[in-house]
Each structure stands twice: as structure tokens, then as C-alpha cells.
Amino acid sequence: MGEKKCPVGGKGIGGQAVIEGVMMRGKGLYAMAVRSMDSGEIKVEKTFFKKERGALLKLPLIRGCVAFVDSLVTGIKIIGRSAEMAGMEDIEYDRDSKFERWLEDKVGDKLTGIVIGISVVLSLIFSIGLFMVLPTIIGGWVNGFFGSNAHVRAVIEGLVRIAIFLSYILLISQMKDIKRVFMYHGAEHKTINCFENYAELTVENVKKHSRLHKRCGTSFLVLVMLVSMFVFFFVNTNTLWLRVVSRILLVPVIAGISYELIKWAGSHDNPLVRIVSAPGLALQHITTQEPDDDMIECAIASLKAVLEEEPDEDYEENKE
């Protein structure tokens, strides 16, 4: 069967691996397919969201920051929900404690939103501290051995940042639960690649496709590391606290530039795009793993749930 690829830029489907399942996202909804740890059945849940944003939020750079925060909030929300769907949330909480009663009386149904908000803030603080502030401090210390050259310090800082990032990925990849998430990540990519190549969504067809995809979030994070090195090369100061503050303040700018780059790479195919995409695709050899058939079934169920609400006529007409 000859391979028939969809137009450059894909078909607008994104996704994320979750606990014992996969989330696929369309234009106006996302669907999660999670395998129950008790019964083994696949549970599917659809969530619709507002499609349109204001004109200001669609502007280049700004839209990247919005997309980053939105993906972070959604990611935390669906990870928790997928754990419930998989049957991992069976712990009974002590509702008789004074703190529990006080919290429920004060916030009521808003409790989940507050928890998610706190989780997002803590995630941002951790990420900025680990990948922005710490490399700045270490880079300045190491640069002391090279005569305190500002540009050399920026390069060292960037290399330290990349080293910390790669070490972090390698470290968590050794965890048993994370390995399963990476396998589901592979199932997500293989299923999207199958869909974008107009193949019937069956387990056997999905298994034939690559687990790498250039529009992956892993590629986005790699671009953040590389873009930050470039930006900080030109934004420099010998005062440590000013360097730290500048790194924190420029995070939205770096996220915005990285988003535009990955959006551009996802809608073009030329030698320059392949160069830009290469580091992210290389790292996906770690962050995605070959899935088993059960995982692929979850990914297919998730994508089909999206297509039920948002049919793709081009795919239906051309699939083989």
C-alpha cells in the first residue's frame, strides 16, 4: 500500500499521555480514553471547551504564552482525572477533620479549581527555579574560571541548563510509572501519525508508524532550552540578582518564541525545519517508548471519540 501523507501541518490533532491512557485534543474538545485497572475496560470521556479567544490573545508571542499556560492547566487537570478513571483514586479522605470541614464550608465546589491553581503555580516555580535560576547561578560560578566574560557565561549557562534538563528527563525515565506514561506517549504519536497518513485506525496499522512527531511537547521544551540560550546571550549583566530577575521576566518571551518556532516547523517541510526539529525528535527516543496493543487501543479510542464530534471528511475520503 503506497503511503499517502496529509498536507504539511497535520490535521489539527494534538494529544498527551495520561495515567493508563491517552488524551486527544481537537479544535473544540478533548477526549480521554483510560483503561480501568480493575475491569480492564476502556473508559472514554469527552470535554468541550471554548474555541475562540480574543484578538489580543491570538497575537504572535502572546498566543504562545497563553497556549503554554493552558496546556499546563489542562495537563494537571486531566492527569488527576485519568487517575480517577483508572481506579487509582480509591483512598478515603478524613472528612471528619476540622480542617476538611472548614475548607469545604469556605470554598465548596471551588476546591478543585483552587487545587489546580496551586499546582500550576508550584509547577511554574519549580520549573523556573530548576531550569532558569539554578543554571544562572551555576553558570556564573563556572564562568569565574574563564575570566568573567559575559558571552562565555551565557553559553555556559545555556549548556548547564540543557545538562540539567537532559539529566531530569533521564532520571524520571527510570521510574516504572513514568515508563508506562512514555509508552502511552508513543501510542499517542503512532496513532496521530497513522491518522495523518490516511491509514485505517487499527492496532496493526498504528504499529507500523513512527512514535516520533515534530509537533510534540518534548520538542517545544527542547526549543525553550535552545531559544533561552540565544536570548540570554544578548541579555546579560554582571550583577547576579539582575541576571536572575531578567531570566524570570523573559520566560514568557522565550515561551512565545518557542511556540512560534514549533508552529512554523509543524506547518513546513524543508531542510531548515528538519534541522530545527532534530533535537526534539532525538529526545523523543527517550520520552516515547514502543507501546503494547492495549495502549494503542486506548489511543485509537481517544482519537475516534474526537472524530465523532469533529469528523474529518478529507480523512474519510482518502483513507486506505
Image: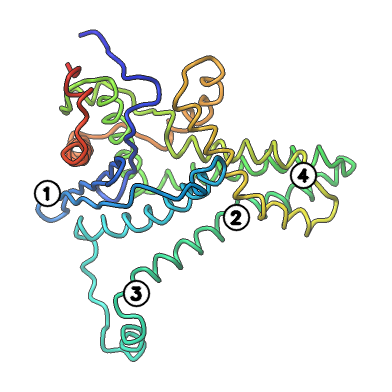
Q: Mark 4 points at which residue?
A: 235
Q: In which quarter of the image is the C terminus?
A: top left
Disc 4, disc 1: CB below 8 Å? Answer: no
Which amino acid type is marked by label 1? Gly
Q: Which colour scheme is used?
A: rainbow
Residue 75 placed where, x, y %?
A: 38, 52
First in sequence, mark 1 or 3: give its number. Answer: 1
Residue 92 placed where, x, y %?
A: 23, 75
Q: Nearer the viewer, residue 118 or 152?
A: 118
Relative horizontal placement of residue 304, taking residue 81 as reference (left or right): left
Residue 111 placed where, x, y %?
A: 34, 74
Which amino acid type is marked by label 4? Val
Q: How far apart are marks 4 and 1 (CA)?
A: 53 Å
Please state which of the two labelled residues, at mark 2 or mark 4, is closer to the viewer.
4
Q: Distance between the residues labelled 2 and 1?
A: 39 Å
Helix, strand, or loop for circle 1? loop
At horizontal 50% and vertical 38% (from top left) the residue drawn is 220
Seen as rendered, the residue at the extreme top is 2
Seen as rendered, the residue at the extreme right is 147
Helix, strand, or loop for circle 3? helix
Q: Mark 3 points at which residue?
A: 111
Helix, strand, or loop for circle 2? helix
Number of residues whose C-alpha sits closer than 10 Å to that of mark 3, classed few (under 14), some (14–19) or many (20 or more): few
Q: Distance between the residues labelled 4 and 3?
A: 41 Å
Q: Distance between the residues labelled 2 and 3?
A: 26 Å
Q: In this view, does 74 lie above or below 64?
A: below
Q: Quadrant of residue 199?
A: top left
Q: Residue 166 carries which label?
A: none
Q: How far apart are marks 1 and 3 (CA)?
A: 31 Å
Which amino acid type is marked by label 2? Ile
Q: Name the residue under label 1.
A: 40
At horizontal 61% and vertical 41% (from top left) the residue drawn is 163
